[in-house]
Image: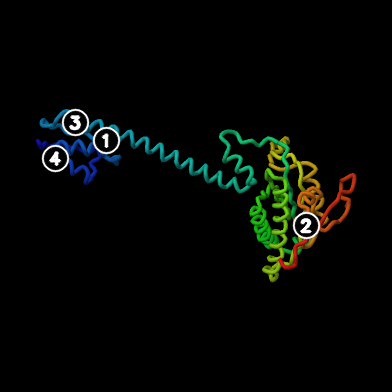
Amino acid sequence: MRTQAVGFESTTGADDERVARYLEPQPIAEIVREALEAPLLPAWHALRIAPDSGHDARIQRLLADNAALARGHAAAWAELTVARRRVAVLEEVRSSLAKFVPDTVRELIDHAEGVPALAKREVDVSVLFVDIVGYTRLSEQLASERASDLLERYFGAFLDEIRAHDGDVNELAGDGLMAIVQHPDPRRHARSAVRAALGVLKRTRELNRELRDRFEPIALHVGINSGPATLGVTRIEGAAGARWTYTACGHTTNLAARLAKLGSGDAAMIGPVTRERLAGEFPFEDLGDVWLRSLERPIPAARLALPPSC
């Protein structure tokens, strides 16, 4: 095969080994192959092909086209790099904001092809309320940093227990939380809510022992109720703007919150629907009809204590 000298001249005068390689005679076939497979060129990517009476015109055109293609690739790569950085920033923002919304909302957004279905709908759920007994007095006795540390230690454990039983903490307010448990089988979500409550009580007992040198032992108010609730986004709008929250509203939720206030220590208060669905599965203690604040008539309630062995 005929060998022909092809000369290159860098517009920047860069001393690059890749340029030097082309200054020595090479087979034309090798020149074509390397031109077609050439990587994106650095600062010397704008090439001028030095005049040479022995050059094959086709090779010159081929190399010139390859140089133009390399410039196009470089520009496209720069745009892609910028786009990737923007996506990375958006993903970081999304991950940060995801920490402030319930798991249910994150799943709806992640799995939705378009706008997520956040409209209110009636769903059969179990609702669990937990708050710390006497937290106002306790917070007065502790420095704000220690009080915050106490909440983080206990509520972090509560969150793990609730998630382990298919619950979703949708509201945190000071010393209390609200969790929603959903499942197509009404008995199953009622059972999961009760097991989550027992898990919360058990972890409280364990942490009271573990942290006894740092904090005074705490007790909890725990209430559970099951039944239909309006589940979805509630939009509160004022002159300064709108606030959105995803929650379960209605009698089922209100009753669970009222029941929680009756309980204390190592026990959970159980609403009538939850007890009816789980009759025979747990050692419920019948409390008869009890009066709850803001209700016009008493409701049957039960108590479920954490076994001493737990």
**Distance from label 4 to label 1 (Cα)?**
22 Å
Q: Can residue 136 be seen in this view?
A: no
Say which quadrant the C terminus sits in. bottom right
Q: Which of marks 1 and 3 is nearer the N terminus?
A: 1
Residue underneath mark 1: 46
Residue 268: which numbered mark, if any?
2
Residue underneath mark 4: 26
Q: Which of marks 4 and 1 is nearer the N terminus?
A: 4
- Binning the other alpha carbons within 10 Å of mark 2 as few (below 14), some (14 to 19) or many (20 upward) gives many
**Amino acid marked by disc 1:** Ala
Q: Are marks 4 and 1 in contact (CB under 8 Å)?
A: no
**Distance from label 2 to label 4 (Cα)?**
86 Å
**Distance from label 3 to label 4 (Cα)?**
14 Å
Say which quadrant the N terminus sits in. top left
Q: Nearer the viewer, mark 1 or mark 3?
A: 3
Q: Are marks 1 and 3 in contact (CB under 8 Å)?
A: no
Q: Is mark 4 on a helix, strand or loop?
A: strand
Please identify the residue farthest to the bottom as the structure is shown. Answer: 213
Q: Is mark 1 on a helix, strand or loop?
A: loop
**Amino acid marked by disc 4:** Gln
Residue at 76% over, 47% down? 226
Q: Is residue 23 above or below residue 216?
A: above
**Amino acid marked by disc 2:** Ala
Residue 60: which numbered mark, if any?
3
Colour style of the rendered protein structure:
rainbow
Which percent across, then down, holds residue 274?
A: 77, 50
- Binning the other alpha carbons within 10 Å of mark 1 as few (below 14), some (14 to 19) or many (20 upward) gives some
